[in-house]
């Protein structure tokens, strides 16, 4: 599932994953909006959000390759985040996304400064991906997929969608799909981390960050658009509100 935080492109924050990206896609597909490049770009934060997400980790990786010093490299994204925050303050722009980005960069840089290991910059992302896997998996196990809750949010009822089979199936499929996205990140990146291959880990994080997130958003939108077209508002109301026919002596 607001623009991406100016931090780790792979994770940013849970708020972005659901409210900023997935939430916008669910809202657009449920309202019948056609899939478009501009819509996908907006869901991942727009050009500015993409740049703010990619730059800190990219600069950290470049500095690490040049200097081979993790602690010096960690100072670069911290400086960038501070400048970006100051720029927003000068322009009197909303600071919510910027602050979350700064927090993300500070956490990643702190992990490096504390451990002295270059690969530590990417460790917080492992925990965030793992947390999303757990959250989605638990929602499936209890029968309330997180995507279904978004259906309910944008359709005006948190329970109505459960009475429409097509929406229940779509909620399960999309939730499983996002579990696979988060799991794929860990499956590729954790071995690189344990091998202490910081350069390869950084490249994998960048490739499986915004680009993979955009592909996941596109797939989700395409799938939900088909479901939305098959289950329109009128049909939805009929399926939910129409009472079962009772037998009578006239039949």
Image: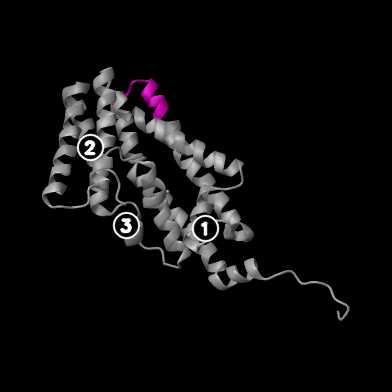
| SS for callout 1 | helix
Q: Are marks 1 and 3 in contact (CB under 8 Å)?
A: no
Q: Residue at x 63, y 60 (%)?
A: 163
Crowd tier of the residue under label 1, counting other residues whose Cα lies within 10 Å: few below 14, some 14–19, many 20 or above: some
| SS for callout 2 | helix
Question: Horizontal and vertical percent for residue 118?
Answer: 27, 23
Residue 157 as seen in the image, left or right of residue 119: right
Q: Is residue 190 above or below residue 225?
A: above
Tell me the distance, in whole angstroms, between the alpha carbons under discs 1 and 3. 22 Å
Question: Horizontal and vertical percent for residue 147?
Answer: 51, 51
Q: Is residue 4 above or below residue 192?
A: below
Q: Is residue 33 above or below residue 19?
A: below
Mark toward the start of the polypeptide (2 vs 3): 3
Q: Badge 1 is on which residue?
A: 152
Q: Which residues are magenta?
A: 189-198
Indicate which disc residue 56 carries: 2
The front one of 177 and 203 is 177
| SS for callout 3 | helix
Indicate which disc residue 42 carries: 3
Mark toward the start of the polypeptide (1 vs 3): 3
Residue 53 as seen in the image, left or right of residue 129: left
Crowd tier of the residue under label 2, counting other residues whose Cα lies within 10 Å: few below 14, some 14–19, many 20 or above: many
């Amino acid at each position: 599932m607001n623009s991406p935080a100016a931090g780790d492109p792979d994770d940013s924050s849970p708020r972005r994953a659901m409210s900023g990206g997935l939430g916008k896609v669910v809202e657009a597909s449920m309202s019948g909006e056609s899939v478009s490049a501009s819509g996908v770009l907006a869901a991942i934060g727009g050009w500015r959000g993409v740049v703010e997400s990619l730059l800190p980790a990219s600069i950290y990786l470049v500095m690490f390759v040049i200097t081979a010093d993790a602690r010096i490299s960690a100072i670069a994204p911290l400086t960038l985040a501070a400048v970006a925050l100051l720029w927003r303050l000068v322009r009197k722009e909303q600071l919510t996304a910027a602050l979350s980005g700064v927090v993300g960069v500070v956490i990643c840089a702190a992990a490096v400064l504390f451990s002295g290991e270059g690969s530590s910059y990417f460790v917080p992302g492992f925990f965030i991906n793992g947390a999303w896997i757990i959250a989605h998996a638990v929602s499936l196990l209890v029968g309330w997929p997180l995507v279904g809750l978004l259906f309910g949010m944008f359709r005006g009822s948190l329970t109505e969608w459960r009475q429409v089979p097509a929406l229940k199936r779509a909620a399960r499929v999309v939730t499983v799909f996002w579990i696979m996205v988060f799991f794929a990140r860990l499956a590729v990146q954790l071995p690189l981390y344990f091998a202490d291959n910081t350069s390869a880990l950084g490249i994998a994080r960048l490739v499986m960050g915004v680009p993979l997130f955009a592909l996941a958003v596109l797939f989700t939108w395409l799938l939900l658009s088909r479901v939305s077209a098959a289950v329109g508002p009128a049909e939805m109301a009929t399926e939910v509100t129409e009472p079962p026919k009772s037998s009578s002596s006239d039949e």
